[in-house]
Image (cartoon, rainbow, N blue to C red):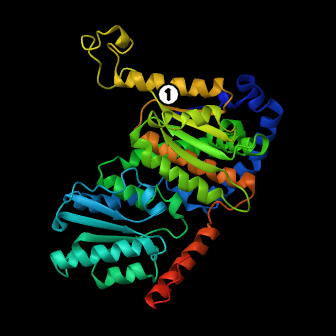
Amino acid sequence: MSYRQDIAGCRAAVLGEHGLDDKAWRAQLNAARPALDWLRAHYADRSLPLLHLPAARADLDALAPLAKRYREFDAVVVLGTGGSSLGGAAVAALLGDPALARTRFLVVSKSGSTAETMTQFLIALEALIAAEGKTAPGRQMTVIAEPGDNVLRRVAGAHGMTALDHDPKVGGRYSVLSLVGLLPALIAGQDAFALRQGALEVLNATLGAAVPADAPAAVGAALSVAFARERGASQMVLLHYSDILTKFGLWYRQLWAESLGKDGQGTTPVPAVGAVDQHSQLQLYLAGPRDKLYTLVLIDRAGTGHRVSPALAADPALAYLAGRTMGDLMEAEQRATADTLVRNGRPVRVLRLQRLDERALGAMMMHFMLETILAARLMGVDPFDQPAVEEGKVLARNYLGEMAQGKVTKT
């Protein structure tokens, strides 16, 4: 596959008293067997459509002409929130401050009624009509929502916009491999087929695993639950060494938190970026509370990037940089962080990528979606609902209604 997973830094053999001993680890891995069986059953009966997205191809062919038309504009603005906007690696390609005449809008809301998205949409719609006329929205706006009667589709229909279907059985935070994530990827010129191919490799490895230890996603799920229960790890730190993965970290944060935080269960996801967060958080990670499990996403970097001129690094204090590349520095820093965490008794899981491309990104996204679903099964919670979030949405709508009636109460 596109990545290798190493959990040696979480085991007692390496980490000592702060790691998992063989007995506890075997018990948690064995507990993952029913979760894997459940996943296979839902794949077989097609009741989880997200598991069949990696092998799909016809929908990408159908989206290609639309993506091509979008690329004819100077900028594309994606309006959405949560899973509707975090799923794509390049969600919004807003370049500078282009004229509205050269801008297209992609409006995404699974329910077709998300308050934040509708607010953005209506403001942008008014601006576009004022600048380009009443027919402009039909040319420059496309919406994605569930089929059926919803307010986003009604407004879109009234203005002649194209409406695309969001599969109602694929939740927003799991929709990255659908048109929600892959249409922006196609518009940005990414290889959507490679994204799905990487995801398919991980899915096949998981479904075909003879035992949980052979499925990296099952190993990751068992690891997170074991450390939460056996070692009190209440936080999951995801530390990566690429600015390109910053939005990936935010996507992971929503996926993990919203899927698992129920009935007193769940751990808090903390995305971090190296080497920046080495200078702002590593002190806490090394010497603070032992309440974290660390996942480091490392990319082979040695020999890549610009090279430091030996002539300009002639000062003896700079000798260690002479002739080295920026990639050499990143390689050394990420290795040093992993080793330092382990030496200080902090549990570290390493995911190592040879390169960061569409195939690797698709593999990582499928890995974490499966890991999240399997962890939920081990915790006994539903990974696909978000009841507490829905309560907040209802209250927000009520408060907006009160504002309209002049009944505003500040708290």
Determine which residue is flagged by label 1: 334
Where residue 164 appears, x then y in whole percent? 38, 70
Horizontally, residue 250 falls left or right of residue 294, namely: left
Q: Looking at the picture, how far across and down is residue 190, in whole percent? A: 33, 47
Q: Amino acid at mark 1?
A: Gln
Quadrant of res 152: bottom left
Q: Residue at x 54, y 56 (%)?
A: 254
What residue sits 16% from the left and 75% below the top? Answer: 132
Q: Is residue 196 visible?
A: no
- Vertical placement of residue 246 versus 344, above or below: below
Residue sitting nearer the eye, 252 or 70: 252
Res 89 seen here: yes
Kindly identify the residue that appears in the image at 56 percent across and 45 percent down: 367
Which residue occupies 28% across, 71% down? 141
Give the left or right position of residue 177, taking residue 235 as reference: left
Q: Position of residue 280 (x, y in %)?
A: 50, 37
| Rendering quarter of residue 106 | bottom left
Left or right of 30: which side holds 76? left
Q: Residue furthest bottom?
A: 405
Q: Residue furthest front?
A: 410
In the displayed structure, would residue 80 be above or below residue 377? below
The secondary structure type at the circle numbered 1 is helix
Residue 194 vs residue 237, the one in the foreground: 237
- x, y percent for residue 39: 67, 53
- Density class for disc 1 (Cα within 10 Å; few <14, some 14-19, many ≥20) is many
The quadrant in which the C terminus is found is bottom right
